[in-house]
Amino acid sequence: MAKITRIPGNALPFAAAVGVGLVALFAAGCGGNASTAAGGPLDAPTSTSEPAVPESNEGGFGAPAAAQGEFDGLAGISMVGTADLDSDGCWYLSGNGESALLIVPVGTSLGDDGTSLVTPDGLVIEDGVQLDVIGGLVAFDDLPGGTDGRWGNYAAFCDPRYGLAAVADSVALAFDAADVDPGVLAEQLDASLFDTDYDCGYGFATGDREGRWALHIDLTTPTPSGAGTVTLPDDRFAVFVVAGAHLFANHCDDVMEWFEPTRTPSVTWEVTAGSFVYPEATNDICASEAATTTLVGASVDTPSGPVALDAVDITNAAFGCFAG
């Protein structure tokens, strides 16, 4: 996981690459949270040396669906990738030359042709589609039931060299920015959307927990230009609202793993009026203090006309800190 580095108030922000990957951390963390119950039976061989021969309507192992309560306590991380069905009937989440065995949500079943998955809410997952997954990465050794359980057999049959399973609490088709109606977004825009703050840097960022909305107060210069009240517009700051998907993906993180989503904005609208107090940036603030500001009287310029926002409080708990 990327670490946070304190940058003095008069230094230039930077992001330095580090050699610590996220996969091992997620695997350990998610595995520790997983239930140890073996769960219900799956149409799987009980021995990898003598694989069972499925009936024509079984589709190999059947749908690789979790049992109720089997993976409680997943980390809730966002993962993206391609649904990949191999010739043995095994499903993977794949991207950038990497893969993890895909375990789909409780209640998912095989489609009629055996080459698709159907979630309880009717989403059809076919080989090759792009997916957005919320869940966790679990090491094969930490799968419920151990090596002799149904998931241990499934992993051994499919391809044990991958070592990780992408376990989905929820799954959706990947977001398509082209499908979004800006007029509908303008009607949804409201200060109540911005209830989750994101740390790092000399600016301020807030949004919703799903990463579909974001509000940024960013500096247009490398370093802060002094504390005080800022009345918009002000050339020292870029203040704007974004709608889309995964809008805080890799925020203040200098390590990008294959399964991590990329920021996908659909619309970006400037905040053309309003004011906020910019705090004093000192050399020690990253180590000991958070910075808070309130954007008041904001007016957002949308294609449907200006949208006024109620006051938005934003806290940057790592003010003056950067990935590195």
Image (cartoon, grey):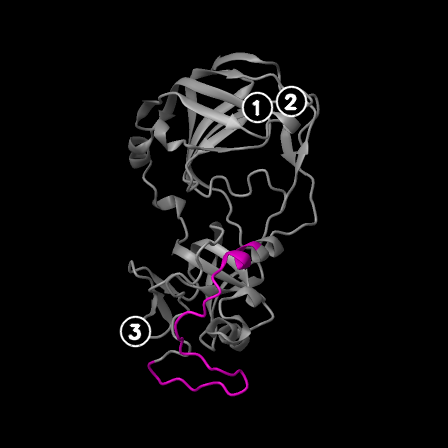
Q: Nearer the viewer, residue 47 or 14?
A: 47
Amino acid type indicated by mark 1? Leu
Give the mark nearer the N terminus: 1 vs 3.
3
| Image quarter hosting the C terminus | top right
- Quadrant in the picture for residue 98: bottom right
Q: Nearer the viewer, residue 147 or 159?
A: 147
| Other-residue count near label 1 (Cα within 10 Å), few / some / many at <14 / 14–19 / ≥20 | some
Residue at (38, 45) in percent of width and height:
178
Question: Is 64 above or below relative to 218?
Answer: below
Q: State how far apart marks 1 and 3 are (Cα).
A: 54 Å
| Residue bearing the label numbered 2 | 223
**Label ID, residue 198:** none
Magenta segment? 29-57
Q: State how far apart marks 2 and 3 are (Cα).
A: 59 Å
Label 1: which secondary element: strand
Give the mark nearer the N terminus: 2 vs 3.
3
Residue at (58, 72) in percent of width and height:
160
| Residue bearing the label numbered 3 | 112
Q: State how far apart marks 2 and 1 are (Cα).
A: 8 Å
Label 2 with label 1: CB-CB less than 8 Å: yes
| Residue bearing the label numbered 1 | 219
| Other-residue count near label 2 (Cα within 10 Å), few / some / many at <14 / 14–19 / ≥20 | some
Q: Is residue 81 magenta?
A: no
Residue 52, position in %: x, y? 45, 86
